[in-house]
Structure formats: C-alpha cells, structure tokens
Image (cartoon, grey):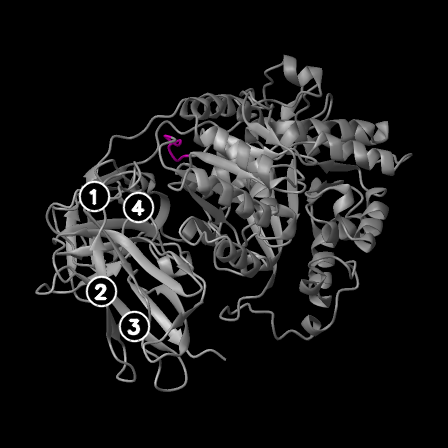
Amino acid sequence: MKITFLLHNAYAIGGTVRSTLNLAGALAARHEVEIVSVLRTAEQPLLGVHGDVRLVPLVDERPDSAAYDGGHELMARPSALVPPTEVLAHRYTALTDARLRAFLDTTDADVLVATRPALVVVLAEHGPRHAIRIGQEHLSYDNHVPGVRAAQNEAIARLDAFVTVSARDAADHRRRLPGLRTRITDIANAAPRPRAEPSDLRAPLVVAAGRLVPVKRYDLLVEAFAKVVAERPEWRLRIHGQGPERANLLAAVAAHGLGDHVFLMGPHTTLETEWAKASVAVVSSAWESFGMTILEAMHAGVPVVATDCPHGPGEIITDGSDGLLVPPGDPDALATGLLRLINDPGLRHVLGTAGRATVQQYEPATIADRYERLVTELLGARRPGLVAGMGRWLGLAVPGQVRRTGRATPGRWTRWVAPGRAARRAGTAPATETERRPSRPSADCRVDARRDVQVSVDWSDTSGQDLVLVLRHRHGDDELRVPLEREAPHVPLKQETPRLAAHAALAALKPKAADGTRSQSVREAPDAIGDRWTVLLSRTRPPLAEGRWDLYAERAADGVRHRLRAGLVEQRSLLTSEFTGAGPVAWWIPYTTKDGYLALRTFRREAHAEVTALPVGEGSSAVEGVLHGAELGAGAALMGVARSGEAADFEAPVEATGRHLPDGHPSRGHLFHGRLPSLPGPTAPGKVIWDLFLRPASDAEPVRLGRLFGDIVDRKDTDKYPEVTLPTTSGGSVRARYFFTVTNDLAVSVSRPE
C-alpha cells in the first residue's frame, strides 16, 4: 500500500510535524510511505525523517536554494483553495494551489492523509476518488475560527474518514455533524521510545514544552512557579518552545522576580534529551487536543502535573496513579501539584515508573496498526465490486486475484510489492540521488558522571578502516587528533510488527508468495548494525583551550575528513555533577550547532567567579556567586570595566557569605555577595557597557564573573533580566540591565532614562 501524508511544512518544529513523522516512520516498516510538504524552509527536516520515508517538497522558500520559488509570479497571488481565515492562510498562494492540484492529479497513492484544515479542504475537493482519503484533526472541534470550522465541516462530508486524537473530540464531531456517512473516529498520536537514557529525577528542574501561545497558559505557570520558589528556591523551570507570547512571558518572569528561576529555552529538535534532565514535567494548558509532551515525559520516567483540561490529559493520565491532574486556570492548584512532587522524591519515582508503563500503549507500531485496520474497514465499506480490484491498497492480493507474476493465488492473502521497490530490491532500478551519495559520518555524544565526554561515531563507508577523531578550534589553528576504537557490532532482537487485524484470513495464515517463498509483512531486521567507533574525552587528558571546537571524523588510511553530524547529545550529568574547585576551572559542554553539527564548548580558567543569582529590583542590584581558584580577602570588590573611554570604571564592595548553596548545585567554593548601590552615569547619549569582574582581594588580579557551569552553551539567549532604575554617583539616575555575553560572562548595560 502506498500512503501519502500532506503536511504544511515538514522542515519545521511542531506537534503535528512530530506526530506525522512518527506515524510515517512506523508505517514505512510495511508500506510505501511518502510525506508531501507544501513548503520547504530548510535544507534538512529539523526533526528528522525515517530513512524509508520519501519526502516531497512542493514549494521551496529557501532564498539561497537553486530551486527557490520566491520569484515565481504565482507567489504574489493569494490562494483560492485555502479558507482565508485559516491561521496559516498567508503562507498559501496561487503557486501552492497549483502545485497541490498537480500533485493530487497525478499521484498513485492508495491512501491520502491531510494533517491540517487547509489541506483537509484541498484533499476533499481535489483528492483522487480512487484513493482512501482521510483527514486528521490535531486541534479540536471548538478551537477553530468560524470560517475554518465551516470549511472543514463541509470537507469532512466528502472524505472517507476523519480522525481526531482524542475520544472526546471524536464524540464532539459526531454530535455536531450528525448524519454524515464519513467515518469519524479517534486514534492517538504515536510516541516512539526515546534513545536517550531516562531521567534519574535528581536535578531540581521542572520542564514544560510547547508553542508560546495563550492557550498553553504559561503565564499561569509562571505565577504558580513563583509560589513554588517561595518554598523551594533551589528549583528551576525551563519552558521549551517559541511563539508570539515570548515577550509577555519575559515580562511576567521579571514582574515576579524570577530571572534566576524561570528560563525560556527556545525550540529544541530533540526534546528527549531535555526530558531526561527533568525531575517533574508540567502542562498548564487551558485545552489540549492530545498531549504529546505528556507521553514524551512519561517515556523519560518523569512524573507529570497537568491541568485536567479538554481533551487530552485526562485521557492519558490516571490521577494519582501515573501522574497528577489539577483544575485548569488555577495557579494555586498548579503550584500545589508541583510542590507535592517536589517535596516527595518517592512519589516522583512511583509516578514516573507507572508513566513509563502507561506510555507503551502509544508505541508507533500500535498506532500504525490502528490506521491499517481503519483503512481495511474503509476498503470493505466500498462497493463490493470494487474490493476485488483494490487489494493492492493494503499491500495484499485478494483471494483469486492474479498477481503481477501472472500466477493465481486462490484463497490466499499475499503481500503486494510496488514494482519500483521490487526493482530496487532486485538491483535492476537505477540508483537514486540519495543512494549514489557517499555516506557522511554522524555521532552520538554523552557526558558521564565525571563530566568526561564519550563520542560514538557511525560512518558506514569505513568498514574495516581505522578512524581518527579530529577536534579543531573554530577560531584558531589548534587541532587535536584522537584515535577512535571500534565497537563490537550490535545485534538487535527481531521484533514482530502487528499484522492487519481486519481480515481473519490475514491473521490466521502465514501466506506464501506466488514463487513459493514466505511473504514478508515486516522488514527483517539486519543481522547486525554496522561498525561504530568510540572515544572517551577526559577533561584533563588532553586539556583543551577555551573556545568552541568542531568535531570531524578522518579515515587514517587516506586522510578523508568529514565534519560530524550530531546525533543524540546527552548532557544530563552536567546538571548534577559538582565542580570541586581543585586545579584550573575546566568545564566542557557538547552541543548541536544551529546547522546540525556536533561541537564542544570548552571553558578553562585559572580562577573563575560563577554567578549563582542576580537579585534585581527598582533601585537595587546585586551579584551573588561562588569563587573558584582564588581566596576571598580584604579589599574584595566588584569591578566594572567600561568597554569604551566614554565612562569611568567603578568598584563596589564584596563580602563573603556563610549561606550554603542548595544540594545538587554544581559549584563548591567561596560564596560571595556584592551590591551595586550606584553606577557612573553615561557622559554621552546611547548605551554604555561595563564588563564585570571580581577582585578577590585588594592585591589580587581580577577574576571574570560569568555563568559557565551547567548545560547551557549560550546564556545570552536564555538568562534574561529586566531593566531597572539605579542612582548614579553624580545624583541622577540610569536604566541598567544585566546580560551575559557570547562567552557567558556577565556585563551590565546602562542608558539614560528617556
């Protein structure tokens, strides 16, 4: 069977994209699967696509691409197919109309699945009648604007089936659309088992993830977390995602004084590694069509506190058994639920373990099987005369049908293989561009409990050869070469994929193909997964200079070198490991670059002042931290060094504090507190920037203040502080704001009030 998914943009990050890619990958184990992406906005899909799934973009929006469609005359004309009130209607044009219609006019797909209202409308109107046509609802009935709701309702009546992701929403659709012949049912989203290790529930960290939009009620979450911090100040909240509410949320964080506790992390392509860092997950939404983040957190063994909102959380979580449900719209209830788990490590482990059992029912193979059974039932509902001629839709030959081999198979259901795929298997089809392209190396990376970095390289073109890992300093000529050691091949267990359940004959028989061989309803797993090469990089052997290091794999025999694509990068241990303060300060953070490569951020300093908190308010500004590699003494001071000669440098006294850092904090050293009672005023219009240092004693060299420890490579993107009014030494006032530089060091910018 050939199954095609119509997706708005497979190259973006989002719940619909993630769930579609999961389902397509699972179905590709038994069928020919393709994803048609209306738009292409990146070189590669950010979330990755299963290797057996074909990806077909229709309109290229990349300005630097040879296939760029931005200058096409039809791009300037609005779409005539998409409802104008559709949220993304502005992204659809006469060109997307033309490309969609051309595709639908020529496709040989047996099943077409549309994943958003605009595409449901197009599929209903222009999809080929020979195909099974299915619409999906990734929101819910009451969460579309009226024009879109009316257009989609009309389209649903012309489809074979319409699938929601929750039972309650399917019931809503059936109640609102009585008398339709269209099959309306619910099938949950698929949640694949992550490759990352599950959480150890040790870090004092709460994690939420989703688009920054009003319905997620992250404003309510920030308010609730202020109540959490009042009781447990060592805990932090990270919110992963992007969206229009970012500025409002930053303002809410500032208003509650939570700059040291709540962090907006931006989008992340591999959330499985971020769930593995959490000890509690939270969903604060006013409504959820399903709850993919709940499943992802459960897979990581992280207990979830979720609002019992329509429609998804209550269908996934059993309150008190595998998670906690709280009333929506109530910050006190949300804070109480969070504190219940924060204050009870035993309950965290119990609910986290139960969640890992619950999530198994959402395995991709199980969800794919439900879609297969739906298609089987839809096929059976077609006119009886058509059924005998449509067996190939299920990858089957019906009883008595003559297969392409010319031999009859009376009384048997057998697997149908597309001619193109059969030719590729036989080696008679020309190689595709992807098949001709040499493989490129990729690498997984993991930080262990000692903060050493293990790199595991996969390069399929190098069987039997020796490899070298090359680390090259991005802004210098420094280069380090480390031999890679070959791992033993991994032999996976062969797991049987569920068969189509709708036909009793298929369940009862292990059919033979026309040539007498057994038909394969699942792809056989390879006998072994190819060679991998590993190395453990110790922070002390070899010592690396501070900076950013790009990683390459090189064949020792001929010197061919390729930069490593990033696979799974696991940094969890960086949140709970301690820096002892012995020797030079060294901290390594492996990470994925914006263009998808593996890199290593290294910090190495003889002494360092780690900033732990920046208490700020109108008329008040302070710095708290831990000094490593030096001793606090008489004359200790904060120092501001102006970047230009337009302002004077300044000093402010620092005192040691006996206050202890919370358990689990990755710093051990001399705690200090410094307050900035006033600042020099700018002598010219515009902003003045001072870089901040700690002078440990009157006769000591200044030490840079910064935030190096932990797992965050670029603090300037995540650690945000509000602008406040401070007095000047001359009697006026200025507006001042702390910020972290590109090297994660602390600075303060100052401007005159307007």
Look at label 2 and name its amino acid. Answer: Phe
Look at label 1 and name its amino acid. Answer: Arg
For marks 1 and 2, give the CA distance: 19 Å
For marks 3 and 4, give the CA distance: 52 Å
Residue at figure coordinates x 29%, y 72% from the top left: 690
Corner quadrant of residue 724:
bottom left
Name the residue tied to disc 4. Answer: 461
Name the residue tied to disc 2. Answer: 693
For marks 1 and 4, give the CA distance: 46 Å
Q: Residues within 10 Å of mark 3 (few under 14, many from 20)?
A: many
Q: Which residues are drawn in magenta?
A: 195-200
Look at label 3 and name its amino acid. Answer: Trp
Residue 182 picture location, percent across and down? 83, 36
Discs 4/2, front = 2
Disc number placed over residue 690 in the picture, else none:
3
In this picture, is 661 found above or below 562? Answer: above
Name the residue tied to disc 1. Answer: 668
Secondary structure type for disc 2: strand
**Quadrant holding the N terminus:** top right
Task: Say whether disc 1 or disc 2 marks the residue closer to the N-terminus.
Answer: 1
In this picture, is 43 found above or below 1? Answer: below
Look at label 4 and name its amino acid. Answer: Asp
Residue most extreme to the left? 699
Q: Nearer the viewer, residue 735 or 375?
A: 735
Residue 175 picture location, percent across and down? 86, 34
For marks 3 and 2, give the CA distance: 10 Å
Task: Say whether disc 3 or disc 4 marks the residue closer to the N-terminus.
Answer: 4
Task: Say whether disc 4 or disc 2 marks the residue closer to the N-terminus.
Answer: 4
Magenta stretch containing residue 196, yes or no? yes
Residue 482 picture location, percent across and down? 15, 48
